[in-house]
Image: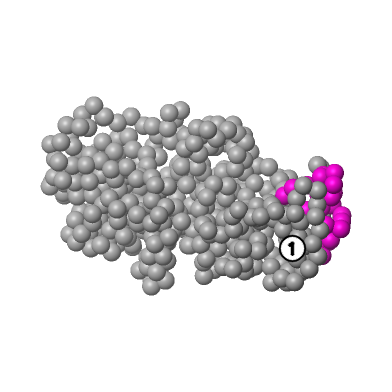
Amino acid sequence: MLRLAAAGARAIVDMSYARHFLDFQGSAIPRTMQKLVVTRLSPNFHEAVTLRRDCPVPLPGDGDLLVRNRRPSSPSRSLNKNDGTQKGRLPTRPTRAHPRCLRSIIFSGAATAWTHTATFRFVGINASDINYSAGRYDPSLKPPFDIGFEGIGEVVALGLSASARYTVGQAVAYMAPGSFAEYTVVPASIAIPMPSVKPEYLTMLVSGTTAYLSLEELGELSEGKKVLVTAAAGGTGQFAVQLSKIAKCHVIGTCSSDEKAAFLKSIGCDRPINYRTEPVETVLKQEYPEGVDVVYESVGGAMFDLAVDALATKGRLIVIGFISGYQSPTGLSPIKAGVLPTKLLKKSASLRGFFLNHYFSKYQAAMERLLELYARGDLVCEVDLGHLAPDGRFIGLESVFQAVDYMYTGKNTGKLVVELPHPVSSKL
């Protein structure tokens, strides 16, 4: 082992373990990548987000470096005067502290988090992407910042500590801001091993766990209960329908087309309602005069008001979103808030909000349960890759913009997913 001290830092070049960590099998990780960045705050995704094409590929680990076996395609712009390197980037030419060798791994300082780098093949689209681009979740976050909540792909490089749990080539998924990128660094503590890189697994990360945890923690589902799911054929609605059926409930689902109604039937929905051909309020009053016990609500506005009116005595309305208002300057759509306390009081009903970030302590268990149901064939994870979109299938980061637009036209069935092909410069 060779130990060299760089100015102001402790550097270790460790050759003994390198093959285990950096066996790329002839593949190349490009020096630069594309990613989406929020450059101004706005609920208009096109105005808020910019596709940047020449971003440095991040390296795994806090202070860790990965050394490549070939000369990088472009030189670093800002170099450390002591050793010819820039923190977080590969050196432009071999140095004593940074020999250009495939089977070497460099650690500089002590890592504070286990991390590995994954090249994502699929990323998920969420209605709340425009809430994030508008700065509504974290007012302290100022542009520019990365965007995208979830991704699934393969590990292509990893830090020393992460190698205790992961290997190069392993399929992983994760949920954290910044997934709209060709590469990203993910803490190993939040990465989720997957059997393979399939978009179906991606559907569970946000959409599936939101449905599972909200219904488990707040829904109080039991056999025979009547459950109303709004936007039932969407990314998270499909899970709410199926999980309610697994709990032996009677499920009503709203949707916007006969094709979606047929899909809902296929996953067990007892009463799909195409609101374009049937008034939802009329159907509920005529067919469910005693009301519904649980509402899984993600639309907001007039649909929220209708859902409140449809509650049974001691009914529970779970708010997981209000997509109808996200594109407005305030992010809200008008509701009849003035009479809400009276309506809830008269029925001993309750209104319950759910935000996934508040339930991370139970996230892993929820994922394990969803994966188990899917493996047994008891759960359908419908993926919409944009085959019916005007411009065709969503491929590449540039198509994220089209996918977001497609979601807000209400055309998708299931979870909207964008495929990210491997960069031309990579053989992975």
* Residue highlighted by disc 1: 105
Looking at the rendering, the stretch of residues picked out in magenta corresponds to: 79-101
* Amino acid of disc 1: Ile
**What residue is at 25 percent from the left and 41 percent from the top?**
351
**What residue is at 39 percent from the left and 62 percent from the top?**
365
- On the image, the x and y values in percent for residue 130 come to 50, 38
* Placement of the N terminus among the 4 image quadrants: bottom right
Camera-side residue: 156 or 331? 156
**Any magenta on residue 94?**
yes
Can residue 135 be seen here?
yes
> Position of 50 compared to 285: left or right?
right
> Position of 377 compared to 253: left or right?
right
**What residue is at 54 percent from the left and 68 percent from the top?**
196
**Any magenta on residue 304?**
no
- On the image, the x and y values in percent for residue 223 come to 19, 61
Number of numbered markers: 1
